Amino acid sequence: KNITLDVSKAVQFLKEGTVKNYEAKVKEAQEALENGTCPGNDFLGWLHLPSSITPEFLKEIQDCANTLRENCEAIVVAGIGGSYLGARAVIEALSNSFSWLIGDKSNPTILFAGNNIGEDYLYELTEYLKDKKFGVINISKSGTTTETALTFRLLKKQCEEQRGKEEAKKVIVAVTDATKGAARAAADKEGYKTFVIPDNVGGRFSVLTPVGLLPIACAGFDITKLVEGAADMEKACGKDVAYEENPAAVYAAVRNGLYDQAGKKIEIMVNYQPKLHFISEWWKQLFGESEGKDNKGIFPASCDFTTDLHSMGQWIQQGERSIYETVISVEEPAKKLLFPNDEENLDGLNFLAGKRVDEVNKMAELGTRLAHVDGGVPNIRISVPVLNEYYIGQLIYFFEKACGISGNILGVNPFNQPGVEAYKKNMFALLNKPGYEEDSKAIKERLAK
Ligand code: PA5
């Protein structure tokens, strides 16, 4: 069984035959990815990554995770963007919603940092870690990203002070480039365990490298199953699969059709399970950073339903008709909770007595789908049998492949992110970073005007 895609409530907003008409473009995009002839062809390492991961490599990651798990009450994963969101998305989707409060002794607490420069956040993190045996996974492909490097400096110092330099070396791991960058230099000098982020895998496509796999294994989840799911989806989205049976191909075609033909400039990723919040965050980066360039691209947004039906629901139902929704629907919850009968029935909810909570959720989903489609919002539905490592692996690869195809149809290079540099240049100039003297002078003159 695989995750499935239903576009029937989206194609009704398109001219007849639209999906079929995209077949040639999709095929061309797929061939360009396979043959390495598309823009950004030096970043195609993700394409056949799942099927090329060996059990030996997974064991090396698991062994390292086990060392961290045995020696740490808390593990801080330092990273940002593609070096952060995939791990968090998978860990949150699979974790107990209240794991923080439960105080789960069988797993270390996984914390994320290096993804912001909030002074309170970092102060409070270091406070929390004060009496904890903690370890650090420093993840940065370039090895020079300010947010992550700044956080790592603080954490390294604290870890060494609390555990001693030699002990700290056992619980600090670097995931970075094979040779370049400050993170690599520090790891080699200190003798940390390291994992390499392959040159040809960009940050937002790297969750199935040690960038995602190591933190996920540290959290106690099955990385073999995750990779297995991704590898099965790699087959299901392969270039020889019939076009209309290939979910990544169809999703890519429909979203481009909605954008080109129906003026749908915003895609809202929706879930009905709060633990999928970070899957949407990961997806937003994947599509946003890949497609938003050359003054083009669908804006990827997200909502958690039914929560946001009580906030954004109004806009979605009746605001500007520039949106469509993609819903990730989990068929079967992991836990079972029946709604109880109440003799007094003061809340008038006895009509739900004996039903599973999920039945109410599913009717909310169906009711919303009908209402939104009636309101002019096309609806794409991705059905996930259950939330486990295997199906999340499928979901990850499905979106990656769809993104590669979709970006190519759009006519952009989906694998670069030149626009991200603009803020960094200004920030470095404002902070008087050595090497930015000219920019510092120019930016200060500009601000003084
Ligand atoms: O997708 C990307 O390439 C980016 O989001 C990067 O992952 C992000 O900027 C972090 O970069 P690095 O891993 O070099 O610290």
Image (cartoon, rainbow, N blue to C red):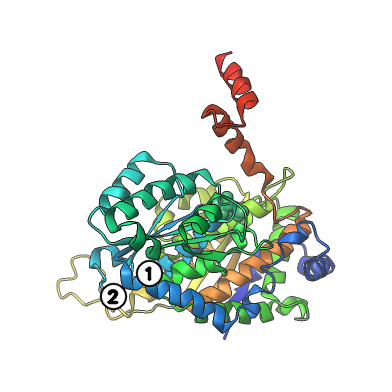
* Residue 365 shows up from this direction: yes
**Residue 430 spot, x, y in % from top left:** 54, 27
Amino acid type of the residue tagged 2 in the rendering: Ser
Give the mark toward the camera: 1 or 2. Answer: 1
Q: What is the x, y in percent for residue 28?
A: 83, 67
Q: Residue at x 77, y 62 (%)?
A: 15
Q: Give the structural element (helix, strand or loop) at label 1.
A: helix
Residue 113 as seen in the image, left or right of residue 240:
left
Q: Nearer the viewer, residue 267 or 248?
A: 248
Residue kind at label 1, given as amino acid type? Leu
Q: Is residue 317 visible?
A: no
Total label count? 2
Report the residue that reaches farthest toward the bottom.
1
Report the residue marked by disc 2: 106
Within 10 angstroms of label 2, few (less than 14), some, or many (20 or more) residues? few
Q: Residue at x 83, y 63 (%)?
A: 37
Q: Nearer the viewer, residue 213 or 319?
A: 213
- At 29% from the left edge and 58% from the top edge, which residue is drawn? 163
- The location of residue 425, given as percent across then percent down, is 61, 34
Q: Residues at badges 1 and 2 in contact (C-beta under 8 Å)?
A: no
Residue 203 coordinates in the image, percent (x, y): 60, 58
Q: Is residue 275 left or right of residue 49?
A: left
Q: Which mark is residue 68?
A: 1
Judged left or right of residue 179, residue 66 is left
